[in-house]
């Protein structure tokens, strides 16, 4: 059973507000537009990001679970915890040497360099990564 009580998640602002729910063996659909918090809520349930309130899986508080295979995730955000967009660009620059100011170009598009990759919704992450990849690819030509 998964049980959420008064769950809140904050980035620059509160993005998940007071969620309460109980899932006990049934399949659940979590609909919503890009950026509405679906991936954020799943990331909190998986213990990938900090949250306030209580998230319990089979009676265990998620924030207290370590190395427990029954609580696992295949969310792509799990593989980029802590990295900011700036970090990704720095890695590319260190490895390949960038010929254009990718950071400046992305900032013109309104993309904050200090934003954590896991703070992007799944849709935003794909769009930002493709944009970053395209700009970085252009900088090598």
Image: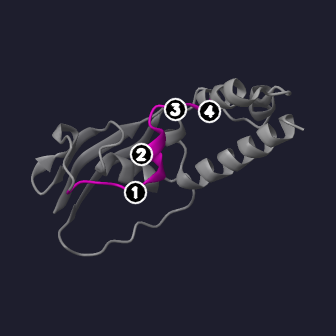
Q: From mark 3 to mark 2, how far is it between C-alphas?
A: 11 Å
- Which element type, helix, strand or loop, lies under badge 1? loop
Q: Are marks 1 and 3 in contact (CB under 8 Å)?
A: no
Q: Which residue is mark 2?
A: 78
Image coords of residue 38 (percent x, y): 44, 56
Q: From mark 1 to mark 3, how far is it between C-alphas?
A: 18 Å
Could you tell which of marks 4 and 1 lies nearer the N-terminus?
Answer: 1
Which residue extends farthest right? 141
Image disc number at residue 83: 3
Question: Is-magenta flag for residue 130?
Answer: no
Could you tell which of marks 1 and 3 lies nearer the N-terminus?
Answer: 1
Image disc number at residue 35: none
**Position of 6 relative to 1 (above/below):** above
Q: How many marks?
A: 4
Q: Are marks 2 and 1 in contact (CB under 8 Å)?
A: yes
Image disc number at residue 74: 1
**Position of 108 relative to 70 (above/below):** above
Which residue extends farthest front? 95
Image disc number at residue 88: 4
Q: Are marks 3 and 4 in contact (CB under 8 Å)?
A: yes
- Which element type, helix, strand or loop, lies under badge 4? helix
Q: From mark 4 to mark 2, how far is it between C-alphas?
A: 15 Å
Question: Is-magenta flag for residue 78?
Answer: yes
**Position of 15 relative to 108 (above/below):** below
Q: From mark 4 to mark 1, how far is it between C-alphas?
A: 21 Å
């Amino acid at each position: 059973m998964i049980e959420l009580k008064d769950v809140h998640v904050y980035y620059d602002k509160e993005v998940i507000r007071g969620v309460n729910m109980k899932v006990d063996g049934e399949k659940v659909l979590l609909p919503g537009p890009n950026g509405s918090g679906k991936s954020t809520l799943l990331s909190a349930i998986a213990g990938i990001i900090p949250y306030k309130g209580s998230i319990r899986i089979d009676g265990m508080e998620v924030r207290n679970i370590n190395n427990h295979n029954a609580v696992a995730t295949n969310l792509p955000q799990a593989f980029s915890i802590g990295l900011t967009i700036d970090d990704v660009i720095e890695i590319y620059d260190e490895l390949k040497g960038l010929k254009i100011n990718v950071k400046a170009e992305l900032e013109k598009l309104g993309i904050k360099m200090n934003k954590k990759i896991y703070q992007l919704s799944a849709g935003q992450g794909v769009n930002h990564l493709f944009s970053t990849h395209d700009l970085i690819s252009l900088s090598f030509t």
